[in-house]
């Protein structure tokens, strides 16, 4: 069940691995939460959804949207009974899918389980949603050891929790392979990168978190404007999230800066390409924090807390908070040192690109205790060092 762009990106490798299994009949379903961005992201992997749910456009509050998603997913499970539902992360689609599965007696597998900030208000509603999925899922695929420990500390049955790595690393590798296979795509991306940056080194920015909407977002945008004025030799590239609460603040502060490029949301290949070429990333995104380490790009996380402290502990990310002065100081420090060079070759703490194969083996082994034990024993996350080097090479 897929609602948003990050769910599409992180479940695409699982869907591709399941499609390779002859005994599995897979239904890739878009819930209708962010259908255009989710559909676009699936296209990058050559996946066409098998089902798309119709939602009530008047359901705009978090509660009304959740109720509507639950209704639509329950109706789908009635029409097309399933043996299992797979949800990802912490969106309203993930929780509505889990609860709909629970009501219909369909076992729930949770991909990217166990992320926690410990603060129900941040991020809201995601922290609450992912915590609520845990007691009703029977398979929990934890991307890191820390996430596994979070679940165990909440009393989740250890036999149902598996350390797999994060499927986003698999997604990066799949996209890299697609680009490598097509010289025309690689050339298009190289030309496009030059076009958006004028050949300058790139600072890539993504902002979307609900808890920052309003004055916080305007403050972050102001810090970026000051940074762009100070570092005119850099191109600041911002694919702007379509939510009007985000695009309004960003455009009002940054629209007229000569070295700032405000773009529409990018297709996944394009985003991965520009990310891998960036000297610095400023973001409040969860997925971007997990992807950037693969390319050795430093990340400033403009949030007050992160459920992904692994990137910080491994030296890739800094949590700056949302105060403009702190963001400016941290960015200045990195740009004055020339960006990413220190981090190249370091290992991505989020995985080695085999998470989806592990997940599929664990899903298939569910009813076979020995196979499950074998699959679980292999679930250790180590990134081969040449992977990062290889990914960096493909854009340089
Ligand atoms: N992404 C993309 N195009 C863009 C911006 C982001 O494909 O213009 C991808 C990015 O690579 C990552 C995911 O979208 O995999 C992150 O989405 P987002 O930041 O919206 O959500 P979060 O990860 O914070 O839940």
Image (cartoon, rainbow, N blue to C red):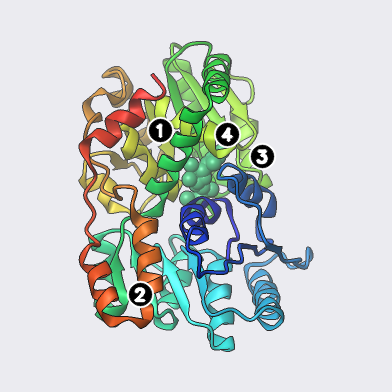
- Residue underneath mark 4: 239
Q: Residue drawn at (43%, 61%), measured in percent from left and top?
A: 122
* Secondary structure category for the residue under label 3: helix
Q: Specify the label residue 366 is tagged with.
A: none
* Secondary structure category for the residue under label 1: strand
Horizontally, is 367 left or right of 52 in the view?
left
- Quote the CA–CA distance across marks 4 and 1: 12 Å
- Residue underneath mark 3: 248
Query: Which dot, 4 or 3, sits closer to the camera?
Result: 4
Query: Which dot, 4 or 2, sits closer to the camera?
Result: 2
Relative height, residue 339 to residue 351 (above, below): above
- Residue underneath mark 2: 365
Query: Which dot, 3 or 1, sits closer to the camera?
Result: 1
Please identify the quadrant where the C terminus is shown. top left
Q: Which of pointers 3 and 2 lies earlier in the amino acid sequence?
A: 3
Q: Which of pointers 3 and 1 lies earlier in the amino acid sequence?
A: 3
Q: For label 3, count other residues whose C-alpha is less than 10 Å away and answer few (under 14), some (14-19) or many (20+).
A: some
Task: Give the x, y percent position of residue 302.
Answer: 41, 43
* Secondary structure category for the residue under label 4: strand
Q: Which of pointers 4 and 1 lies earlier in the amino acid sequence?
A: 4
- Quote the CA–CA distance across marks 3 and 2: 48 Å
Q: For label 2, count other residues whose C-alpha is less than 10 Å away and answer few (under 14), some (14-19) or many (20+).
A: some
Marks 4 & 1, CB-CB < 8 Å contact: no
- Quote the CA–CA distance across marks 4 and 3: 13 Å
Q: Is mark 3 within 8 Å of ligand 1?
A: no
Q: Which of the 4 image quadrants contains residue 390?
A: top left
Q: Specify the label residue 281 is tagged with.
A: 1
Relative height, residue 232 to residue 353 (above, below): above
Marks 2 & 1, CB-CB < 8 Å contact: no
Q: Nearer the viewer, residue 344 or 181?
A: 181
């Amino acid at each position: 069940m897929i609602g948003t762009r990050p769910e599409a990106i992180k479940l695409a490798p699982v869907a591709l691995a399941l499609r390779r299994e002859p005994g599995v009949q897979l239904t890739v379903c878009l819930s209708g939460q962010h259908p255009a961005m989710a559909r676009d992201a699936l296209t990058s992997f050559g996946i066409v959804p098998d089902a798309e749910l119709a939602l009530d456009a008047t359901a705009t509050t978090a509660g009304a949207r959740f109720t509507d998603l639950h209704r639509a997913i329950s109706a789908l499970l009635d029409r097309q009974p399933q043996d299992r539902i797979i949800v990802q992360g912490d969106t309203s689609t993930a929780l509505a899918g889990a609860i709909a599965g629970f009501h219909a007696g369909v076992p729930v597998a949770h991909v990217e389980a166990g992320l926690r900030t410990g603060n129900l208000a941040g991020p809201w509603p995601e922290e609450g949603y992912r915590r609520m999925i845990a007691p009703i899922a029977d398979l929990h695929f934890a991307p890191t050891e820390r996430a596994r420990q979070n679940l165990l500390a909440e009393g989740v049955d250890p036999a149902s929790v598996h350390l797999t790595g994060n499927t986003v690393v698999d997604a990066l590798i799949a996209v890299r392979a697609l680009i490598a296979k097509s010289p025309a795509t690689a050339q298009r991306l190289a030309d496009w990168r030059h076009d958006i940056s004028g050949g300058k080194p790139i600072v890539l920015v993504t902002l979307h978190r609900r808890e920052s909407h309003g004055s916080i977002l305007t403050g972050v945008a102001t810090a970026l404007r000051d940074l762009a004025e100070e570092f005119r030799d850099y191109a600041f590239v911002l694919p702007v999230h379509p939510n009007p609460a985000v695009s309004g603040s960003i455009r009002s502060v940054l629209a007229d800066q000569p070295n700032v490029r405000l773009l529409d949301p990018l297709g996944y290949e394009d985003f991965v390409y520009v990310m891998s070429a960036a000297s610095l990333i400023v973001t409040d995104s969860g997925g971007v924090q997990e992807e950037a380490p693969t390319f050795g790009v430093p990340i400033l996380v403009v949030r007050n807390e992160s459920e992904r402290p692994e990137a910080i502990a491994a030296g890739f990310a800094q949590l700056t908070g949302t105060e403009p002065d702190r963001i400016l100081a941290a960015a200045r420090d990195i740009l004055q040192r020339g960006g990413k060079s220190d981090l190249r070759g370091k290992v991505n703490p989020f995985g080695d690109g085999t998470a989806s194969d592990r997940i599929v083996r664990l899903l298939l082994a569910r009813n076979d205790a020995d196979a499950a034990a074998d699959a679980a024993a292999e679930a250790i996350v180590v990134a081969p060092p040449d992977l990062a080097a290889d990914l960096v090479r493909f854009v340089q």
